[in-house]
Amino acid sequence: MSIPREDIVLILPIALALAGAVLGLIADAFHGRRLAVSIVILGLAAGGALGIWVAVNEDPRSVADILAAGGGTSAVGGAVMLIGAVAVFGGWTWFTRSSMGAGAAVLISIVCATSATLAASLDLLLVIICLEALALSGYALTAQARNGRSAEASVKYVIQGSVATGLLVLGFAILFGVYGSKTDLLEIGIAIGSGPVEPALAAMGLIVSAFAYKLGAFPFHSWAPDVFETAPPPSAGAMASIPKIAAVSAAVFVFGVAFGVGDTGSLSTLWLVLAAGSILFGNLVALKQTSYGRMLGYSGIAQVGYVLVGLAAPQATWTMSAMLVLVVAYGMAVACAFLGAEAVRQIRPEWDGSIDGMAGIGRSQPVLGVGIAIAMFSLTGMPLTAGFWGKFGVFGAALVDEWQWLVAIGVLGILASVVSFGYYGRVLRALYFDAEAEASTVREEPGSESSAEAEANPSLFDASTDGSSVPAQAATAIAALAIMALGLAPVFWGLEWLYELFYVFG
Amino acid sequence: MTALVENAWIVVAVPFAIALLVGVAGPLARRLVPWVTLVAPLCVLAVGVSGLVTEAEHAGAVRWLFGGEYALSFGWAVDGLTSVMLTVVGFVATMVVLFSIGYMHGETGLPRYFGSLALFTGSMALLVVADGLVGLFVGWELVGACSYLLIGFWYQKPSAAAAAVKAFLTTRVGDVGLLLGLALLWRETGELGYGGVFEAVETLAPAVVTTVAVLLFIGAMGKSAQFPLHIWLPDAMEGPTPVSALIHAATMVAAGVFLVARLWPVYEAAPSAQTVILVVGAFTAFASATIACAQRDIKKVLAYSTISQLGFMFAALGVGAWVAAMFHLVTHAAFKALLFLGSGSVIHATGTQDLREMGGLAKPMPITAWTWIVGSLALAGVAPFAGFFSKDEVIHAVVTHNVVAGVALFAASALTAFYITRATRLAFFGKYRGDGHPHEGGWVMSLPLVALAIPAAAAGFAGHKIAEHLGEHGEALNLPVAAASLSVALLGIVVGWTSYRDGAESEAAMESRMGGLWTTLRGAYGFDGFVGAVIVRPVVAISDWLYGFVDRKIVDTTVEGAGKSLPVIGRMLSVLQNGDAQWYAALIGAGAVILVALSLVVKGG
Amino acid sequence: MNVAILASVLFAVGLYGVLTRRDLIAVLASVEVMLGGASVMLVGLATTIESAAAPEAGVVEAVGLFIIILAAAEAAVALGIVMAVARRRRTTRVDDLTEVSG
C-alpha cells in the first residue's frame, strides 16, 4: 500500500510527535535533559498544531485504508498532542530534574503519538497494539517517582491491566477466528452481518469490558485512584486525559463500524449500564475524598460516565461530536487540574497532596488560582466553559430520545453534574476561602538537598525535583485559556462550528 | 435615546468589561475603582429609562443555528417588562455602589468587591434582556455565582464561607428544577426562545405545560427563597450589607418573580401551576413574617421580611395578577434596598447588628432615621407610601380569588407592620444602649438613602404607568381592601410601638411572655436542622458507605471469610490473602462476565 | 470446537492464577498463560472454522505472532516494574503491598 502524496500531510502530525520522541530519547542518552524535554515539547506542539490545521482544512477520509484522518479524527489527534505538549511543558521542572525525568517526557510523547494513532485506527489489530502500548507506557509513567508507593501502584496497575489485555485479546481472537480472519473494522462488520451473531455478542462484551477498563468506568475503575494519587502530577495529568480521549474516539469507530452492522442492539444497553454505574459511583465516592489526586481520579470515573451516555445514544448528527467535545474538554480540564497541582507542589514542597493543603493558594497566586478554578468549573459543567458544551450536546441528545432509560440516565447525569460541585467546589473553597495553615514562601530558586530514603522525605515526591513553579503555573494558565476559548467560541461562531470541528465521519 | 434601546446589549457588555477591568487593573488604581464601577449600573439605568421613555420595543441577536434538530439564538429583546426591570436594577445598583464607597472604606480586596458588583450587574442585565430561556439561564447561573462570591467576601470568616456555599447549593437545587423544565420544554416543542415558546405552548397538552410551569417555578423558588428553599437567604446576611441590599433584597431574589412574569403565557395555560405558586407564596409570606418578629439581628429581620414580601409577589402571580406582582417588585426594590442601606448605615455607625445594643439613634443620625421611617411605612403599607398601593393591589387580587390565601396575606401584613415597627423602635428610639459613637456616614452614604426614599415614598403613584408599560391597564384603588389593609397595618404599628416602649427590656419581657414560641420563631422553626438531618446527612452517609463498603469493607470481609494463613513479617497491617490488586482484577473479570452475559441476553435497545 | 474449549480452559486457568497467586512472579506467569489461551483461541478458531472468504496466506500466522510479541513486551515491562518494587519493598509477595489504598 502506498500513500498518495497529498495524503502524507494527514499522518504528518503523528510522525512529528514520534520524531520528537526519538530525538528526545537520543538527546537524553547523551545527558542533555533540557534539550530532550524541549525537543519533546516542540515535536508535540508542532504535531498538535498541524493536526488542528489538517482538521480544519481536510475532509475526513481514510489513509491507506488503515487510518482515518482529516476532520474530527485529526482534531482529536491534534488536541491530544497539544494537551501533551502543555503537560510536558508544565512538568518542565520535574522532568528536567528527576532521575527518570526526560525519559518520562519521551514516554508522554509516545503516549500522544500512540493515542493519535489509536483515535484514527480503522483496523482492530492496530487498535489492540495501540491500547497495549498505552498500557505499557502507563505502567512506566506510574512508577517513575522512584518511591515505594508509586512502584506499588504501578504493580497493581500491571496486574489489573493484564487481565484487561487478556479480555481484549480473547475478544479479538473470537472475532478473528469466527469471522474469516479479518482485522479491518469494516470487513469484520460485514462478516458479522452475514454470519452467526452469538460469537460476536460474546466478543462485544469482552471488548466493551476492555474499553471500559481503559476509560476507567465502573466497575473497571479500580486502577484509577491509585495511579492518579501516586504518579507525579504532570504525568498524571497526561495519563488521565490523553488515553481516555483516544479510547473514546476509537470506540466510535470500533463499535460504530465493526459492531454497527447486524443485530447488536444490546450495545447501547451495555454502555448505559456502565454509564449509570460510573456516574453514581464516581460522584458519590468523590464527595468523600480529601486527597486532590484521588478526588480527580474518582471524578474522572463520573466524567467517563457522562461520555458513555453519548455512546449509548443513537447516532444523531452531532451526538458523537458532542461526546468528543465532552471528552476533550474533560481532558483539558483534568490536565489543567493536575498541572495546577504540580504548581502547588513546587510552591509548597511540604504539601501532602490533600485538598485542604491547598488553602490560600488562590489568594497568594491569583493566576494559578483562576486557572484551577476554571478547570473545576469546566468539570462541573458551568456554562461558558468547554465542559458545558460537551455536556449540553450529550445530555441534550439523551433527553430527546424515545428510549426512556436513556432519558433517565440523561437526567441522572444532569443531577450528578449539580452534585459534583460539592467536591469541585471544595477545591475552590480551599483555594480562596480557607486560611493557610502555616506561612509558605514561593520557591523560585533550586530545590533543597535530596534525602536518602524517599519515604522519609516530607515532600510528596523526590525533593531534588523541587524548583520553580513558573512552568507549571504557565501551563495551567494555557490550559485554562484553552478551556475558556472553547467555551466562548460557540457564543461567537455558533455551536455548530464546535461540533463540526470534531465530526469524524466522512 | 432610541439608540440606547436599539443597542441594549451594552447593558451586558459594559458591566462585564468594567468587571474585568476593575478586577484585573484595580489594584493599580484603587482610588478610581469604585467610581469606574459606577459606570456599570448607570449604563443599565440609562438603557432602562430610555426604554421607558421611548416605549420602544426592540430586539436583536447573535444568532446561531445548527443543522438538524436544534435551533438556538443568543439574542436580546427589550420591551416594557425589560425596561422596568432594567430601571429598577440600574437604579438600585447605582445607589448600592455609591453607598459601598463609604461603607466599605478601608476594607481590603476592594477591586474584587467592586468587580463582583459590576459582574453581577451585567449578569442580572443579561437575565433580563435575554430573548430566550438559554440566555436567561446563563444570566441566572452567573448571578448565582456572583452571589456566592459576594456573600463569601469576608472569606476568612468561616460562617461567611459556609453561607456562600449554602446559598450556592440551595439555589442549585432549585436550578435542577429549572433545567428539567427547560429540557422538557425543549423536548416537547424544540423551542427555547420566548416567541417560539409562547406559540408552542398553545398546542401542548395541559399536563406537559403544567409540569414545565411547575419545574420552572422550582427554579424560581430557589432563587427567590421561597419555602422550602429559603434557608440560604438569612445566612446570606454574612455578606456586606450593600450586597444584601442589592442582591438579596432588590434584584437577584426578584429574578424568580421576573421569570414567572416573563413566561406568563405559559403560566396562563397552567392553572394548577398557578395554584401551587399561590400556596407556596401565601404560606411563605405568612410563615416568614412570623419569624421576622423574633429576630434580634437587624439584617435578619430584613431578610425574613424579604422572603415574606416575595411570598406576596408569588401569591399575586398565583392568582393571575402578574402586573400587581411586578408593581410590588418595583416598590419593594425601592423600600427594601432603602431599609438595608439604612441598616448598613446603622451597623457602620454602631458596630453591631444586634437590635438590643442599639437605641436612640434618631438623634445622632437623622437622615438615616427619617429615610428608614419612610421605608418602614412603605413596607408596612401605610398610605401614601409606595408599599400601600402595591400591596393593596396584591391583596385585592388574592383575596378575590382565594379567601384563605387572602387572610394569610392580611395576617402577614399585620405582622409586617408589627415587626418593622419593633425594629424601628428598638433601633432608633429610646435610650442608646451600646458603646459606640453613632454618627452619619458622609454624603456617599446619605445620598443613596435619600435617593431611594423618593421612590419608596412616591412610586405608589406610578402604578398605572408601570402597568401600562407592562401592556395592561392599571387597577384603581379598591377602597374596602385598601381600608382593611391600612387598618391592619396601623394596628400592627400601634401594637409594635407600644410593646417596645422600654427598648431592650421590652424585648426581654416579650421573650419571657412568649417563651417557647419566641425561641421557635427566632430559630425559624428549626427548618435548617431538619434539612441537615433529612437531606444532608443521608447523602454524606451514602457517600461514606459506598467508599467504605466497596473499596474497603468488602476486601476485609472477603479476607476474613476466606481464612488466613498469614506470613507475619514484622508488619502490623491487615494482611490480605489475595491482595488489593487481585481483588480489583477480579472485579474486572466479573464485570466482563456480566457484560458478556448482558450482551448475549439483551437484544434491542 | 475442541480447540475453543482448550483455549477457554487455558484462559480460565491463567485468570485464576492472576487472581489468587500470592507471589508477583507467579502472577506474571499466569498472565502469560492467559494470553497463551487467547492465542490458542485465535489460531484455533481461524484455522478450523470455514468462512465465506479464505484469508490471505500467512495472515493467521502473522496475527498469532503479533499476539506473542504483545505478551512478551508486556512481560518485559511488568518484570521491570516488579524488580523496582522488589528493590524498594524487599518483597515480591502481593500481600505486602498494601500501602496505597482508599
Image (cartoon, rainbow, N blue to C red):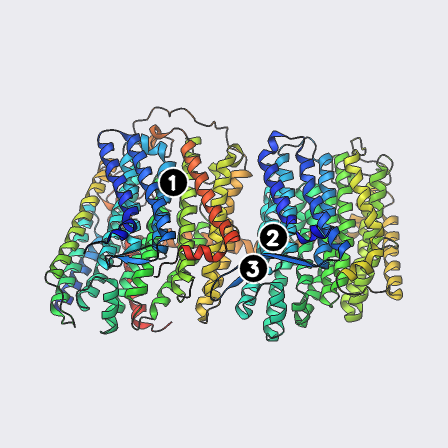
Residue A381: percent from left, percent from top: 49, 52
Q: Quadrant of the C terminus of chain A?
A: bottom left
Label 1: which residue? A86
Callout 3 secondary element:
strand
Q: Secondary structure at mark 2?
A: helix
The chain carrying label 2 is B
Q: Nearer the viewer, residue B559 or B253?
A: B253
Residue A138 is situated, as x and y percent measured from the top left of the image, at 29, 45
Query: Is residue A325 rendered to the left or right of residue B145?
Result: left
Q: Dividing the image into 4 quarters, which one contains the N terminus of chain A? A: bottom left
| Residue at (36% x, 31% y) in the render | A93
Q: Which residue is mark 3?
A: B73
Q: Amino acid at mark 1?
A: Val
Cα–Cα gap, marks 1 and 3? 34 Å
User: Is A437 located above or below residue B590 in the figure?
Assistant: above
* Location of residue B134 (image quadrant): bottom right
Q: Are marks 1 and 3 on the same chain?
A: no
Mark 3 or mark 2, whichever is nearer to me:
3
Q: Chain of mark 3?
A: B
The image quarter in which residue A206 lies = bottom left
Assess disc 3: are there few (<14), some (14-19) or many (≥20) residues with their C-alpha within 10 Å of its C-alpha. many
Q: Amino acid at mark 3?
A: Ser
The disc labelled 2 sits on which kind of residue?
Gly
Residue neighbourhood size for the residue with mark 2, other residues' Cα within 10 Å, grouped as few (<14), some (14–19), many (≥20): many
Mark 2 sits on what residue? B139
Instruction: Classify mark 1: helix, strand or loop.
Output: helix
Residue drawn at the location 75% of the way across and 38% of the way down: B347
* Residue A382 in the image, given as x and y percentages of width and height: 52, 51
